[in-house]
Amino acid sequence: MAGVMDGVNSRTQLAGHNRLELLMFHLDGRQRFGINVFKVQEVIQCPLLTQLPHAHRAIRGVANMRGKTITLIDLGMAIGRPPLRDPASASVIITEYNRTVQGFLVGGVDRIVNLNWEEILPPPRGVGANYMTAVTRIEEELVEIIDVEKVLSEIIQVESTVSMQLIEEGQRTGRQAHHHALVVDDSSVARNQVKHTLDQLGIESTLARDGSEGLAILKSWAEEGIDVPSRLTMVISDVEMPQMDGYTMTAEIRSDPRLQKLYIVLHSSLSGGFNNALTEKVGADEFIPKFNPDELAKTVLKRTGEVDDARST
């Protein structure tokens, strides 16, 4: 237990300081890629694979690990690069995204580096950025950070429709009237998933691509003389984002008297025991893991109900 708590304590020190640990790896050549260590459970040599008939072409098979069946995805193939020639000699990065555990087959793992999120930048527009969510430079080399949520949405079907019962609840109580949410996420797929959920509930939304852009939008409204906490029902933000992460954005909001009363939900594919401590530390109101449309809808409806009750008094 002491070792687990040491891990929690060491990582909570990064919260609010805009830092991350990045695991770097190769696919089919010299180009280096990165993934947040928070999402990595372990790195292993590729185990014996069992083929799956009629599976997505990037799924190279499944493996039994500690009594669990794990899907193994050739990450290069998933983003349109050549397949690994010899999966048996590949490394596997075991990750947890969006409540599921999967393994990504990669050519080799490099090392872990500690960076500031300000060093992580949005990808250049229109330059092969379809599967990139961010880029950074390490030792004068470009490191690409893959939009894993987009990869998984194309390989593993994700339910995006809110149940009719919740939609009807929102319509019946009239909670969708005059509600507006700010959605902050660097993944276009994730932004659209949240927007689609809000659309189904009849709630307007403004979208931002990272914490820096989201904070700039909020401050621009405040500078226009708008009472932002009264205008905005909630902020729904990812955690991992280039330039400014969700934890730092939350801390910045809480330090601004014009914004500090905003209701903030951190909505992240990061999973595990760190999140409650991190959420509490930076002052967010809730944490919910990605992506379950009904769970997100329930969180939104609970908040709109609280706002409607306050308005009626």
Image (cartoon, rainbow, N blue to C red):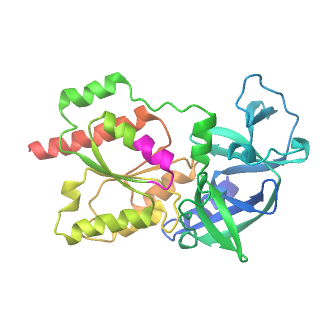
Using the rendered view, name the quadrant where residue 303 is placed: top left
Q: Nearer the viewer, residue 80 or 101?
A: 80
Mark yes or no: residue 254 visible: no
Mark yes or no: residue 77 visible: yes
Say if the magenta span includes residue 187: yes
Q: Work out whether 56 lies above or below 259.
A: above
Q: Position of residue 246 (x, y in %)?
A: 46, 60
Name which residue lies at 33% across and 40% down: 198
Q: Nearer the viewer, residue 58 or 229?
A: 58
Q: Work out whether 76 lies above or below 163.
A: below
Give the tally of numbered discs: 0
Say if the magenta span includes residue 263: no
Q: Position of residue 175 (x, y in %)?
A: 21, 36
Q: Which residues are magenta?
A: 185-194
Name which residue lies at 56% across and 65% down: 124
What secondary structure is the magenta-colored segment mainly?
helix
From the viewer's perspective, tell me whether residue 111 is left or right of residue 194.
right
Q: Nearer the viewer, residue 250 or 238?
A: 238
Query: Can you say which quadrant of the picture contains the C terminus?
Result: top left
Q: Work out whether 28 lies above or below 83.
A: below
From the viewer's perspective, tell me whether residue 205 is left or right of residue 141.
left
Q: Position of residue 285 (x, y in %)?
A: 36, 52
Q: Position of residue 271 (x, y in %)?
A: 57, 47
Name which residue lies at 47% across and 35% down: 292
